[in-house]
Amino acid sequence: MNVVVTGFGAFSDQNDNPSGLLARALNGQRIGENTITGVVLPVATGQIGPALATALEGLRPRLVLGLGVAPGRMAPALERVAINVRDFPIPDTENAQVVDEPVIVDGPDAYLASLPLKAILAAWRAAGLPGYVSNTAGTYLCNQLFYLLSHQGRDGGFRAGFIHLPALPTPAAAPTPSMSLDVMEQAVRIAVDVATSHIGPDLPLESGALS
Amino acid sequence: MNVVVTGFGAFSDQNDNPSGLLARALNGQRIGENTITGVVLPVATGQIGPALATALEGLRPRLVLGLGVAPGRMAPALERVAINVRDFPIPDTENAQVVDEPVIVDGPDAYLASLPLKAILAAWRAAGLPGYVSNTAGTYLCNQLFYLLSHQGRDGGFRAGFIHLPALPTPAAAPTPSMSLDVMEQAVRIAVDVATSHIGPDLPLESGALS
Amino acid sequence: MNVVVTGFGAFSDQNDNPSGLLARALNGQRIGENTITGVVLPVATGQIGPALATALEGLRPRLVLGLGVAPGRMAPALERVAINVRDFPIPDTENAQVVDEPVIVDGPDAYLASLPLKAILAAWRAAGLPGYVSNTAGTYLCNQLFYLLSHQGRDGGFRAGFIHLPALPTPAAAPTPSMSLDVMEQAVRIAVDVATSHIGPDLPLESGALS
Amino acid sequence: MNVVVTGFGAFSDQNDNPSGLLARALNGQRIGENTITGVVLPVATGQIGPALATALEGLRPRLVLGLGVAPGRMAPALERVAINVRDFPIPDTENAQVVDEPVIVDGPDAYLASLPLKAILAAWRAAGLPGYVSNTAGTYLCNQLFYLLSHQGRDGGFRAGFIHLPALPTPAAAPTPSMSLDVMEQAVRIAVDVATSHIGPDLPLESGALS
């Protein structure tokens, strides 16, 4: 069964975006009975939709898990909600800085994640890993992708979720939280495993925390 | 024209909840052509709905602005979205600690604020006041109230918004951000003024940032 | 009896430096049996010493209390130690950016504050005010002044202390802690009162927290 | 040539104190021309001095580098100064909670680190590692040890320094910064290498940043 894990490419000071590195690292791996397709998406508001469509074509995934880096976050964060807002704090890589526009015109105001958030959190804890449930994925590209995934997953019969990651350990002018790639990979693998173990045959999926 | 400003009573270590103090202070005041009705709500998940119904009865407000304290916040925060989730980090004053339940069963996943957030922010800046747009009102009583207000406002023809406030300056074991009540009152008065100035006769209101 | 309270002028984005405003506001006031001389010092490493000498000339103060702003601090901070290091994170107003040089060549590595820190903290708490003891005054101009005051106070028979203040409430790109000037003035007045009440006739003073 | 690296044992919620784990891991290793003796010290104010004396006996180290964990720190922190103050925020493992007492009666107010802080920082950056210079080691056991090391090093002819480490990645109620042990070990190895490379035959050592 197919699971898609997306990451993002470089942007701003994130030359080594851990989300993209993880998507690449997980590509082709098996987690439980799932085969992972890893996809690296551009940090460009106009390109995410088409790139995602290309990536998902023919795969019929049961789960699409988006990953993104959020410098300043201290641990992997399971996002609870994607909102229908693009309000960019900085321009994207195509120099677009969208202000207060929807992700999808006339789309609902938000989608709750269709992942078992608390079950994933419990599995992280059992494995000795830090992490938490976050109530905002921001209003930048990560939220846009999460909203798109949720919107398409509702129609396309797959679960959609998003995990924000800390930055990798690198020199910084001021103290900054970071996390090693292997720890983050372990967290993502557990998330995929728990999320797919909780899926029964009874699609369509409900939204909400399914713990 | 009627505007309702709600605050909350004491809870946890917030014996002097600035949101309740402000609701009391603003009660009966005029802001522009509006008369303010200030209401103090209990920090109890089962009581908010009935208390709100009683408070709004017969008022036909054009705007209901919820206030709440969020210890740790550094400046007044205009909340962008209310989500259909109750997931309490601490029990309420009736000792109820709800986990992952909706505010309204079968309600939409979220409502975006029907306030002109950026226009209020611009007015704060023009007045020399700090403040920002927040993308999460949490999953406690504040979010519950904000969701209820948004839900009822959609039917009842009033705008709904929520502002999170810093705690008042008081002794604390560790350094904690705070703000004086007069500064917060000025911010709330400006918010009411801008929000009502932006309302035309053409209800029902759209959701979303209306800047 | 004379007490000197120093503040700093504008620098960086601190056009309204609350420490300078407070020094001006307190100038000429009486606190207990003390008359306050308020002095505004330049944020320039080469000018602090001469400006301080001019300010103290003929005053024979019993206490010199330095004030400075530290944007990001959440509450007034009683500094515990001044170190013999200048290592500027940003240039001063004369464009000098000193790296790893002493304040006074061959001076001791540090001076502990000669204020009753815990007694001041207790008085703040009794008055309902936030505040804390800080273990670093940084390595910029504030620390330089605090070290100079401590060094001169040892010889000149006056107590020396330093309080770091939050920034004033003003618009900022990101949420930032702040505090109103009247709250900070109250904290400084209490500090002066407690510090001078604890001084007996038995100079020279010992260093260290005298609570 | 001998280098001693000390860590601490378990205390509070730090069951796996990374400083103790690193001291154990480095024990017996060679770094450049140095042989490391790793020592785990108890988190007990009355036992540090004797334990340290036992550990250093007969070794005649050229460098003693203390390590300690500081939960909440985001990256390894090179401490600049040890102060002659014990003011414990929590009791030690023997239930002693010292308030405002010196580390050494009649000792100087503080000692600056006798490590080339900026050179170590530069080497960390060259290796792609995060880290920063910290201006306070607190007033708990870490500072006590750092002060003791500095005091004895002045007489005993060895350099003394201290590095504060983030906590290891473990589950936590709230998001908390952390760092993997292997990243921290790399940082400590580099610190030892740079600190000993900078030592010439011309002891006694000066204090201060020697970059």
Image (cartoon, coloured by chain):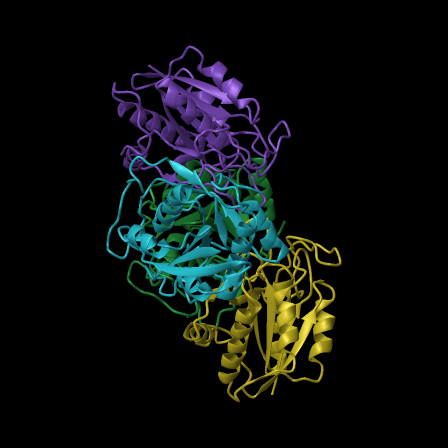
Chain colours: A yellow, B green, C purple, D cyan
Above/below status of A196 relative to A208: below
Question: What residue sits 37% from the left and 55% below the top?
Answer: D58
Question: What residue sits 31% from the left and 37% below the top?
Answer: C128
Question: What residue sits 54% from the left and 58% below the top?
Answer: D33
Residue C9 placement: quadrant: top right
Residue D144 placement (x, y as % from top left): 35, 47
In the image, taking residue C41 as reference, residue A15 lies left or right, namely right
Q: Is residue B84 visible?
A: no
Above/below status of C201 relative to A56: above
The furthest residue to the top: C58
Q: Is residue C47 visible?
A: yes
The furthest residue to the right: A94
All told, the count of numbered labels is: 0
Residue D112 placement: quadrant: top left
Residue A22 placement (x, y as % from top left): 62, 72
Q: Nearer the viewer, residue C114 or B27?
A: C114
Q: Nearer the viewer, residue C105 or A3?
A: C105
Residue A40 placement (x, y as % from top left): 69, 71
Q: Nearer the viewer, residue C193 or A117?
A: C193
In the image, taking residue B210 as reference, residue B29 lies left or right, namely left
Q: Nearer the viewer, residue B132 or B155?
A: B132
In the image, taking residue B99 as reference, residue A139 lies left or right, namely right
Above/below status of C178 relative to C94: below
